[in-house]
Amino acid sequence: MRPRHSALLFIAMLLAALPLFAEREPVLKQADVPHPYYWREMYIPQLTTGPSSVAWMPDSKTLVYSMAGSLWRQELGSETATELTAGPGYDYQPDVSPDGRWIIYTKYNADALELWLYDVQAKQAHALTTTGAVNVEPRFSPDGSRIVFVSTQFNRRFHIFTADFDAKAGALNNIQRLTGETRSPLPRYYYSQFDHEISPSWSPDGKEIIFISNRGHIYGTGGLWRMKADPGAFSSNDRGEMRELHYEETTWKARPDWSRDGRRVIYASYSGRQWHQLWMIWSEGGDPLPLTFGEYDNVSPRWSPDARHVAFISNREENTSLWTVDVPGAGDSQVQVRRRQYLRPMGHLLLTISGAERSSIPARVSLTGEDGRAYGGGAMHAEDGFDRKQRSFEAHYFEMPEFKEEPHDIAIRLPLDVPAGMLRIEAVFGFEYTPESRSVLIKQGQTANVTIEMQPLHRPVRFDDWVSGDVHVHMNYGGTYLNTPERLLGQAAAEDLSIVNNLVVNKEQRFPDVASQQVNNRSTGAVRTRIFSGQEYHTSYWGHIGLIGKPGLVLPGFSAYPGTAMGSLYPMNADIADLAHERGGLVGYVHPFDELPTPPNDTSLTHELPVDAALGKIDYLEVLGFSDHKSTAEIWYRLLNCGFHIPAAGGTDAMANFASLRGPVGMNRTYVEMLESNNKRKDESVRGKGGEPSLNDAPAAIWLSGLKSGHTFATNGPLLSFKLGNQGIGGQLSLPAPTPEMSAEGGAHFSLWLRSIVPVDHAQIVCNGKVAKYLPLSGDGMKLDAQGTIPITQSGWCVFRAWADHAEDPVLDNYPYATTSPIYFTVADKPTQSAEDAHFFIQWIDRLIANADANRDYNLPWEKEHVMDVLHQARKVYEAQTK
């Protein structure tokens, strides 16, 4: 979406050279389903070093499961796992034929998920589908004659398909779509306007299936439905062919499994709690009851053929693990994997990361074998997009912790299993050290001992007074892993990040981190990383806001949820900001805009940002975040032109317990200059031994105050320094009125520098929304030192910014981007204002007024009166600038 109003023309020209996301594209882009960072993590299988899905052999004593991208077989009572497949690609979601001869599974390879078949006797595998779509959750019918699975091959959305299975040829025939396609009139936000059908499970007689669908519901992936496993049954609900057994707000992970007795169905549910547990319900419906309990996830349940046991995946040990429970029985038990019998020749890697006078530092590490697959230890993560011209799969990585000579670190130092052959090692330690890579030959049965020394970037001046923090992190958000404060500290330390603002937030009906929301001022390790608890207030009507540096929660934590008792537009974000400020917190708008708003044309515009800017409710803006940096900057510039002082912040919106992340914790971060003037206490050392942040309570207050004061720059890679006149970032200059004798070279003197771990293509000083100075970069685009003068004739602001035209590894964002907060200046004591920009926001607020006036979800008349009054107050602020 691009501007048509003349007031946006100069910014459009300014940004004409910017990229359109160039080569980087989303993973599994062939699925046309909203919010892929949810369904991809919660529904699509992910690479984990622990088990991720499980099935039973016919003897009810042997398990087949996916682990580390391969299929494995293991008997109950044994601690040895035998590898059945080893690529190409990654193998997931096995299901075993009733006679035990075949294993059907889904393979992630060639940028798609296809169905494959493994012959247990011949120990060979081949493809069953070549659709180029996303094909998942395959299941054999009880007699082995049919297959049911989920695919996006029809209109790129999730629907259930069936096929006949030819056991002699090992092939699928007569593939037919069983469900869909129904467009819903409901106002869904996180889910498609088209209903989906997922997670099918056969009845014991093979005539019916139970599955999950959101048909008729706004929120969640839907309830449990039952229908005949025949094409046409889906559309014949009037004859009772399809019926909903039970509804609750599931989120991709319910995966019901129908027992062989035909009476019981087991599935994963978070009903009334923060984490998934196993629940059972009659196959005819009724009231479900939980089978397992705990403050962690138990998911992907599978009945044994004799209906006496259930196998499932748990994250109770942070990483994934395999468990079984007897029904009835004496609790659950873990299927331990202490020995692995590999298909391929394997060796071992003992890796140490060092740097800057330290024999061991943490880091983000990627290991890639000759087969193109990723290897590693602990919790494995994957990025959400990649360049198909550069690699076959998205990058995978894990956090390499700092090694200390202590007994509890011995397990960390155990060699990692890696395939024999050349192994590519990549290590990243934040933005102040150069990324390093090595290629190492791994020999069969031997251990390669490798040390990688990270080299600090050379900066022209001391950088010790700048401390990095991420203003937007979610420790847990419904992902694959169970995150803890200790592990979150490790994730941040591996990124050389000093401060983490963990924003507690609802994932629809859950608040996954509500038990940790009082974990404040927690720190560990030489990097001195610290966690602060905050909140993201979730209303997709007014826009999301971050509340940081404050104790406690604002409840209910969300508003304007249509179709619920919390559907009222009250409270507004302005009201929540007032509550946060009363508690001493800071308020910022998070991930504002994926596209540039156009008020004259956008009749559905509801975002409250310009209202709260006008009323002084905003302490910072995520100029760099989970949104389009350029679109957000355009709106930010307009607000600055209206005289509002809004600092730039960087917040990743990292779902830190996801296996598939948009980026690691600290990918988008805020550097704050730790000026003693930010805080009344001056007797505390900001930096500790070795130049690392000493984040005791006083410096923490200095960091938050520095953010509010605008002594910041936001970045996903480049480091910036900027001075104008005698002022640094966030400062204010007072200049006299220009005279006719002032030459074009007159004005304010500037000095700046840039250092970057990746190349950038553009560096500019932007003043009052226009490029005031284009700055030439060095040959590699990673260094800049410049000074000069900028003509200044009217009050306003300047920022220094830099960006690249395309994605640059290891910055796991759409493109590298960095910007300082403004340096403000007044000329002849005149205020900063812009009639054009004020008119733009008046049009915006008029849209808000019209939509709020037409809304019918208010609980009481005074709620609507309050909302309308706030909107009109903000409009008057902009009206004053047009006169």
Image (tube, helix red, strand yellow):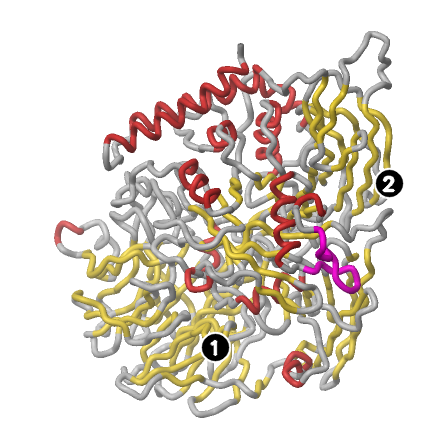
Amino acid identity at mark 1: Ser
x then y, percent, for residue 494 = 67, 64
Magenta residues, start to end: 682-694
Q: Residues within 10 Å of mark 2 (few under 14, many from 20)?
A: few
Say left or right for 691 vs 172: right
Q: Residue at x 52, y 75 (%)?
A: 50
Q: Give the mark nearest the N terminus, 2 or 1.
A: 1
Q: Is residue 683 magenta?
A: yes
Q: Main secondary structure of the magenta part?
A: loop
Helix, strand or loop at disc 2?
A: loop
Say left or right for 440 vs 597: right
> Foreground residue, 761 or 686?
686
Q: Give the residue at the far bottom of this rendering.
A: 77
> Foreground residue, 505 or 220?
505
Say left or right for 141 vs 341: left
Q: Residue at x 14, y 49 (%)?
A: 238
Q: Reply above or below: 733 against 118.
A: above
Residue that badge 2 annotates: 778
Q: Is residue 148 magenta?
A: no
Residue that badge 1 annotates: 321
> Foreground residue, 330 or 761?
330
Q: Reply above or below: 494 against 819.
A: below
Visible residue check, residue 601: yes
Helix, strand or loop at disc 1?
A: strand
